[in-house]
Image (tube, grey):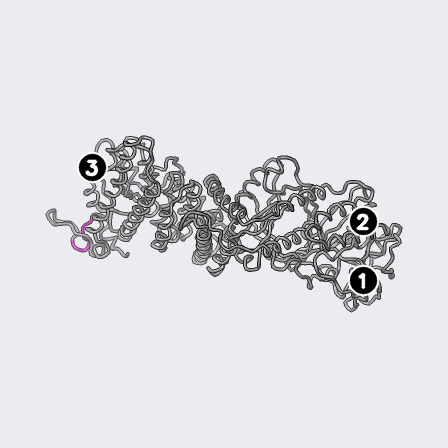
Amino acid sequence: LTFFFLWVCTMQHVEALEVLLQGLSGVPKERVRVHELCLKSVPMLGAVPSEVRLLCDLAQPTPSWTIRHVGGAMRGAGAEQISILVRTIVESKASSNVLRYFYGIGYKLDHEILKVGFAFRFQRGAQFTVTVTSANKMPKLHATDEAVQVTPGIQLVEITAPAAANNYNDVVSAVTSFCEYLAPLLHLSKPGNSTGIVPTAGAAAASLMSSGGAKTL
Amino acid sequence: PAMDAAAAPGAAAGGQQQQQPAPPRAERLNGEVQSQLNLEGMRARAVGLYKAISRILEDFDAIARVNPSGSPKWQDVLGQFSMVSMELFNIVEDIKKVNKGFVVYPRNVNAENAAILPVMLSSKLLPEMEVEETTKREQLLSGITNLPVPSQMEKLKARIDMIANACETAERVIAECRKTHGLGARQGANLGPMLDKAQAAKIQEQESLLRAAVNYGEGLRVSGDQRQMHSSLPSHLMEVLATGDGAHNFGDNSGAYPKNTPAFSPNNVNAQGNPMQASGGQLLGRSAPSPGTAGTPNFENVSTPPMPYANSPRSGTNMMNTPSPQQHLTPQQQRQKLMQASQQQQQQLRPSAAGMLAQSSVPQLQDLQGQAQQKVAGQQQMQYSQAQALSQFQNRQMQAARMQPGMSQSQLNQGNQLRSHLGQFTGAANSAMFTAAQASSNSQMMANIPGTMQTMQSQSMMPQMQQFGLTGGHPQRSHQMMTDQMYGMGGANTTSMMGMQMQQQQQQQQQGLYGNMQGGGQSLQQQGMVGLQNQQQNQMQGGGQSLQQQGMVGLQNQQQNQMQNQMQNQMQNQLQNQMPNPNFSQQRQQNQQ
């Protein structure tokens, strides 16, 4: 799975980004509301602690759980040359018992985060998932209704696309070229690097918004 | 225009006036046609256009002769070209209004072209074009073919509107960016609105916080005493987290893992309501619910059905977890201090976090280390200057320009949604990108773009195609786009449908020559084609009418250099784009002789 990270500035720009993404993708946006619980294994369980994330999709009427394990990132000279982060990710749907199960086998809640936003899934050389969310933390445990933004006014834009071992170069180029379209509004970077803002973001966003927003099918 | 097509589909004779014209009777245009088409004016315009193009080509010739390696001033050339193309477009538009009343009558048939005439005049699609058309149609209508036709049309129309909207906004974005960077009006980088340093620094800091929170959970960890289970769990966790029995001391850090499962009681109030420190970076603690003590399996909790713990008092249940005894406190405190520091916090945090996790000095998750390094590197990149950002942006523009040619070809072979994106960046966008890529200043060209845009807004996507005349390869792409957009009109306009086929064909030919025109069966190409040396056999499909011959007849006698071909191609391509089915009167043909 390839991973691409960046961020976007104020709320105003988020809407502009939504307009742009809708136009680029041609699909209606999906609401995203995911309660992500990051569990870490107890060190006594193994030499190397492992981390697993449980994602509970709250956007659907019936919450659905997903287990996601994020593996190590691709390393080496090749990894540095390509502009996106390539990581191995294993995902699996699970029943609602999953949290209890992990607690039972020795995992502890490390942190939890609530991500609220929207996403676009479309095919464009690769199966893209572009997610624009605000990260919210919960003041009290599991209090998803009381979540407040970690960084008010700044949202996270993630662009991910799955890739196999033999075709990830194509996916990389597809993702990179797609991100060029977002250049007026954002800079994207690998998760470890910060990007700053695009000087034209304000003007670009204003012009995107002035048209009155996108129409939906 | 509601032509009286049934009465006079054939010759230019007025349909109302006679059925079998007496030979000496002068032919006149149908009244409606006449009212809508000023034939004399049209001819004058066409001739003028022809002359302008010839003049331009002569200029090229002159330059080439004088200085064999010289090239014309592209700025002027492009300006002239845009004028020419605009004029051509206008002519085509006018013709299109009345093309139903005309038919192309082959003239000047001789041995050479007699064989090809039936093919050119036929309106049936080539088999491969037909296949392509059906597949495209299926793609377009997939999913809504089961609905009644009007609703299908509505959906397609909505889709078109969405795409058009996105295109508009994208164009506006491009124009804005161009303005802020001074590309359109003048040379030199105009940095546009600048953030002051403080703002930029603050944004940087926020960004780092966000990344840390999402990637590593920094700032999200809740210290032990704040991990109380509060009044109500959200619904998705209600059934998930079972209650546990017994109360545990909050401060039980002796290494016995307190029971994890929190009590769920809608009425319980958090006894330890410590105010949360919401500021980022203040929340610490490695607390996490422990799965249970080593000795006691947790299953006793698991087995408890959800509801009973509605009333079970469970005071002091906490989510505090100290995976190991007090030794963690010091690293925690250490972390606290670090977190309160300035932006350097992350750098320092990484080693300490590493220290925490690797209790046995086993290197922790590979991820973390690698990411730590990445983060450090990222921090060093944080010297952020406007100039950098600007140059990055310009680079992106150039990269985008370079990448577009390679990219859009492959993408065009995919579904509709891809075409929408291409549509967005056509026109001004692409011109801007191409010119940026060519590293030539062409304010003239860009100035023309808004002009052309406005004049051609009536056709939803057509104006943008003109801009593709810059290089030979692009018109084909635009044809594809145009094709699909035309499809989107629901097939109501048959003429445009046929035009698409032409364009599809065009795309397949590398040289972007005349393409294949099908259908309608009328073509003016024969005249020009006969004369041109390097043209192979053209298959005319689609609407079958074209103005191609105009330019070509005149150009036969000139050197067939690359530029000419390109110009011709561009002309033709534009023609074919914009007038899929023009019907030209015979008089026009004759005039061209």
Instruction: Examine the image and state in which quarter residue B222 appears.
Output: bottom right
Residue type (three-letter) at the residue carrying disc 2 = Gly
Residue B150: percent from the left, percent from the top? 43, 58
Q: Which residue is mark 1?
A: B263
Residue type (three-letter) at the residue carrying disc 3 = Asn
Q: Residue at x 21, y 33 (%)?
A: B110
Q: Where B534 falls versus B255 (above or below)?
A: above
On the same chain, marks 2 and 3? The answer is no
- Secondary structure beneath dot 2 equals loop
Residue B451: percent from the left, percent from the top? 35, 53
| Labels 2 & 1 near each other (Cβ < 8 A) | no
Label 3 environment density (alpha carbons within 10 Å; few <14, some 14–19, many ≥20): few
| Labels 3 & 1 near each other (Cβ < 8 A) | no
Q: Which residue is mark 3?
A: B108
Left or right: A186 as drawn, with respect to A68: left
Q: Which mark is residue A106?
A: 2
Q: Which residues are magenta?
A: B12-17
Residue B25: percent from the left, percent from the top? 11, 50
Quadrant in which the N terminus of chain B appears: bottom left
Label 2 – label 3 distance at C-alpha: 90 Å
Q: Residue at x 89, y 54 (%)?
A: B254
Label 2 environment density (alpha carbons within 10 Å; few <14, some 14–19, many ≥20): many
Residue type (three-letter) at the residue carrying disc 1 = Ala
Q: Chain of mark 1?
A: B
